[in-house]
């Protein structure tokens, strides 16, 4: 060990006090730079990446929780539709929204509905509420804008899965 440190100590002793101070300051700055590059920057990057992963995980957890709430509500809504009947439920919700749909059996076997002239906001809210709040499925939907800024809706609903179209296997 003496063989390695001996020449280094001789070299150090050969420097003036001013040179020793400058070399010591340089070594301190080099150590601080190495500490910054090898420890602090990677730690900050790891912390930021962990924060981003946590935010994504929280958003995913909120979406899963929201979807589970919707799924849990569907059986209750479908049971309510089964108790009340599909047609009375659709009529009641349409009347509550201020709409008067024409209801009839659809060619696919679902409950067909038609709104000849309705404001788009309440009509879209009604269709959305049928699907999200009452667990009904929108099997087919056609929307046409009328000249008087109203819309014409035509479609079919089902309480469970949508029936296959006629002629499909």
Image (cartoon, grey):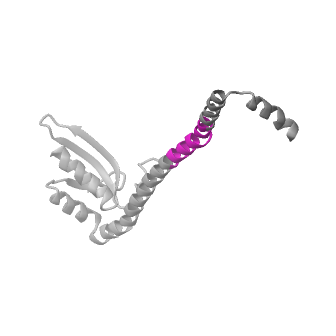
Q: In this view, does 51 lie to the left or right of 9?
A: left
Q: Is residue 64 left or right of residue 124?
A: right
Name the quadrant containing residue 20: top right
Percent from the top left, x then y, of residue 160? Answer: 39, 61
The single residue placed furthest to the bottom in the displayed view is 83
Percent from the top left, x then y, of residue 2? Answer: 86, 40
Name the quadrant containing residue 70: bottom left
Q: In this view, does 97 lie to the left or right of 83?
A: left
**Residue drawn at x 30%, y 67% as measured from the top left:** 81
Q: Is residue 140 or residue 107 the one in the foreground?
A: 140
Quadrant location, the N terminus: top right
Residue 165 higher or lower than 92, as above or below: above
The stretch in magenta equals 32-50
Q: Is residue 79 magenta?
A: no
**Residue drawn at x 26%, y 52% as measured from the top left:** 127
Prevailing secondary structure class for the magenta stretch in the rendered image: helix
Percent from the top left, x then y, of residue 18? Answer: 63, 28
**Residue drawn at x 45%, y 50% as measured from the top left:** 55
Residue 161 shows up from this direction: no
Residue 78 higher or lower than 23, as above or below: below
């Amino acid at each position: 060990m003496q063989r390695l440190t001996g020449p280094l100590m001789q070299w150090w002793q050969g420097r003036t006090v001013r040179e020793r101070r400058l070399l010591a300051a340089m070594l301190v700055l080099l150590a601080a730079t190495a500490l910054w590059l090898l420890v602090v920057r990677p730690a900050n990057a790891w912390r930021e990446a962990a924060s981003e992963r946590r935010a994504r995980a929280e958003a995913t957890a909120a979406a899963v929780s929201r979807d589970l709430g919707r799924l849990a509500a569907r059986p209750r809504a479908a049971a309510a539709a089964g108790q009340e009947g599909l047609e009375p439920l659709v009529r009641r919700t349409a009347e509550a929204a201020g709409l008067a749909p024409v209801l009839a059996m659809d060619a696919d076997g679902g409950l067909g509905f038609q709104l000849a002239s309705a404001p788009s906001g309440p009509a879209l809210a009604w269709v959305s509420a049928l699907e999200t709040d009452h667990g009904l499925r929108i099997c087919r939907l056609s929307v046409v804008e009328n000249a008087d800024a109203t819309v014409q809706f035509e479609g079919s609903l089902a309480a469970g899965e949508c029936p296959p179209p006629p002629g499909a296997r």
